[in-house]
Amino acid sequence: MHKSGVPTVGTELGREILMQLGTLQLYGMDPQLTPMERGLVKYSLLMDKSGLMDAHMRFMKQFGELERDWQLTKDAAAVSKGSGVEARPPVRKKAVEGMRAIRLVELKVGKRNHGRVLYATICADTFFLSLIQTLVEDDEGHAARVMIDDATLDGSASWAKAQRRYPKGAKVAIKAPFLSDLPDESIALYVNSEEDLVVLSDSSPYVAEVDPWEGVDVASLRAEGNRLFSKGDWPGAIEFYTKCIQKATSSNQRKIPGSKNKKRGHSESNGLTSNGKVSTETVMLAYSNRAAAWMKLSHYERALADAGEALHLDPQHLKSIYRKGCALHQMQQFEQARDCFAMALEHAPEKEIKLAHERSSVCDQQSRLGVYDIHKYLLDDYDGSTPPEYSDYVGPVEIKLMEGKGKRGLFVTRDVEVGELLLVSNALAVVHAEGRRMFTSSGRSNATLRDELVFKLSNLVLKSSKWLQQMCNLADCDCHGNGKVPSLELFRPNSKWNSSKDDVPLARIKGVVLQNALGESGSCARALVAGQQPPMRQFLGLWPLPSFINHSCASNSFRLHVGDTLFLHASRPIEAGEEVTLAYVNTLLPRQMRHDLLDKDSWEFKCNCSRCELETNLCAPLKQVSRRFQSLWGYKESVTPGQAESFKMAKLALNLEHILKNVGLYLYEIQLIRASFFIMYWIGYLNLDRLGDLAKRLPLPENLIDAMTTATPGDPMSLFFAGFWLKKFQEQGANGAVIDDAQKRAMHICRCIYGKQKSEVLKRLVKAHDVTINV
């Protein structure tokens, strides 16, 4: 037992799941508890049965989908194996003879009560997440959570198996009870071994498990699967297709009684042939239909395997060929998918198959050439409810260990130009905040979105060995995986990868999210939709390959989100061998405020890029301006022309110009500092009339645009600012040279965001952004 009071768990997985209840303290952070978690702390301390039951049921509901996928996968893998019923633990009353009883209210946190025994009743359904979790109630009506480290139940055990072993209603005795304080400040009984929990009697309504479908023929089982499929009950359909396949396999391995007397004319009505064996067609259709059900649940590798089994039995079955193609397409095996659809077209040139063939052909070309017609979605009339599909793409980049730092980064393999596409990545999972009130500044700082993303990823890794391997290769807060340099084949479409499976405990997934998940803050643009700017939204997602890109306040790449697809373009010229960097937060702010945002968004590092070093060296001359800027930041009046706070901010820009003139900086350095205080200059332009002759001291708008482009090329604010002045010059009737110059600046920024596009497309994109800015 550790001095902290947290017991030593028998397995590493058990320890991490025990720690999961203290989500963020596992990583040395203060937990941001949800109302449910705060209630759990309260009810566990009060030993309140009603409150604990409610929290327990919520946990079971939260992880129920995860258990369903787990069990479906396990059942399908055991198609040809007989499965016995797990025996209940024997009643062992003598195991606690001679031990003195103790009540729940007598237990003290952190103290193991040797020689004592707690008598209680299991009062809730048991569930299993590496540790057995349930509730017990003593004779006085007090209740407590129980966590059991049962070495006889491994990671493949189902909840049903755990519930048979620890049934609701069973009278139990817990030897040497230990009440542990968990990292989230709640308490729970921790049972170090299954030997320390003795079942005294079992009063639960237990009936020996008998399969009610034992006497049903295979055709009826498949028909029931079809009925459930038509209702949208995909797990139910899979269950009956699996029963059909299991029974068919079993039936064909033994002689069917009375099969010789069957008439040929009636041999197929129950799925049997004239010799008493299950027909090949029945089994083939069960596999094919189960493949379709797996597809509905996003188990694409399972779907591919079942479609393959169906085609092994009937190589010409059209639906199986089509379903195999669909599974391959979702796995980004576009070349093979295209070939499957081409084969299907030879049998039936149907519209649905033609469209599928076209989609796979386009995605295959995208994945190889990196050519995407995103401008059609951005600017043209788009009547679809979801963005078009895009393939992943790995451009001129590689993952390497950074010299002298021991961590990984993404580097270019050749010289690249501004606007060149570096990679395209579809999210493993994304959660959005639409329709909900959010009280945090970004998706990264939103604990609710983080928890939702962790849950989606926990479910996801059960569905695909590729997704699992991608997750295993990402760093978490304990730097697991940070020393490995994975092959890019793992992230490239149409490629093979190492499918060996590692375990990813829930605590590890939380660490991966904290270390790598990206939100809407930072150098990120929400793509236009049909020429319109969509409303601001909070989101949080995990993109595999971009997770290897490190932060810089003077980044050289820019991420554009089109739906859930991330496009990464070079925003500066990058030389071969140079690291690709990305801004994680808004970098049009002073150094301290940028660092505060990194802290607020739970990025556990301090940026030491060249821009941060410059501002650190200028800390003394910039101290008063920075302090005053931060004090004015957040005042709504600061951005309203004519208001007192707005005029103060404008005069602060003049003070900064005076400082920059006297500290002896290069133009490049002056531009970096101006960009950090961009908002002051913008407010200065809004107060030109009040500044009078002093306004001449402000840099020209084009000079400020250059400063923003120098510091953070591609930042959406710089494009809005450039578009604003372009429109202003046009409205004021400026000469052609001024307008052309403003147009070129805006198009350059547009290229940083949207990549290399034709001039006419860039002009249309600029025009779509030339709206009045509300800073």
Image: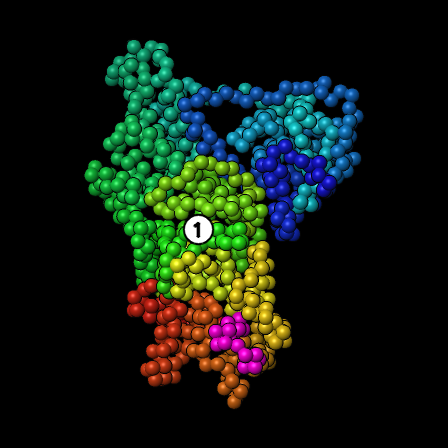
Q: What residue lies at 43% left-to-right and 66% top-to-bottom?
A: 714
- In percent of width and height, residue 360 lies at 29, 46
Q: What residue lies at 74% left-to-right and 29% top-to-bottom?
A: 176
Above/below status of 145 relative to 428: above
Reading the image, the residue beneath label 1 is 399
Above/below status of 457 relative to 718: above
**Residue farthest along the bottom direction in this orientation:** 693
- In percent of width and height, residue 676 lies at 53, 71
- In percent of width and height, residue 702 lies at 43, 78
Q: What residue lies at 56% left-to-right and 81% top-to-bottom?
A: 662
| Amino acid type for the residue under numbered disc 1 | Ile
- Magenta region: which residues? 659-678
- In percent of width and height, residue 279 lies at 30, 21
Which of 150 and 705 lies nearest the eye of the viewer?
705
**Residue farthest along the front direction in this orientation:** 404
Relative to 429, 747 lies left or right: left
Q: So how many labels did they put on this image? A: 1
Q: Is residue 484 magenta?
A: no
Relative to 762, 680 lies left or right: right
Instruction: Write down the quadrant of residue 487 in the picture.
Output: top left
Relative to 567, 37 lies left or right: right
- The prevailing secondary structure element of the residues shown in magenta is helix
Which of 664 and 710 lies nearest the eye of the viewer?
664
Above/below status of 93 relative to 539: above
- As helix, strand or loop, the secondary structure at mark 1 comes to strand
Which of 374 and 377 lies nearest the eye of the viewer?
374
Q: What residue lies at 63% left-to-right and 76% top-to-bottom?
A: 624
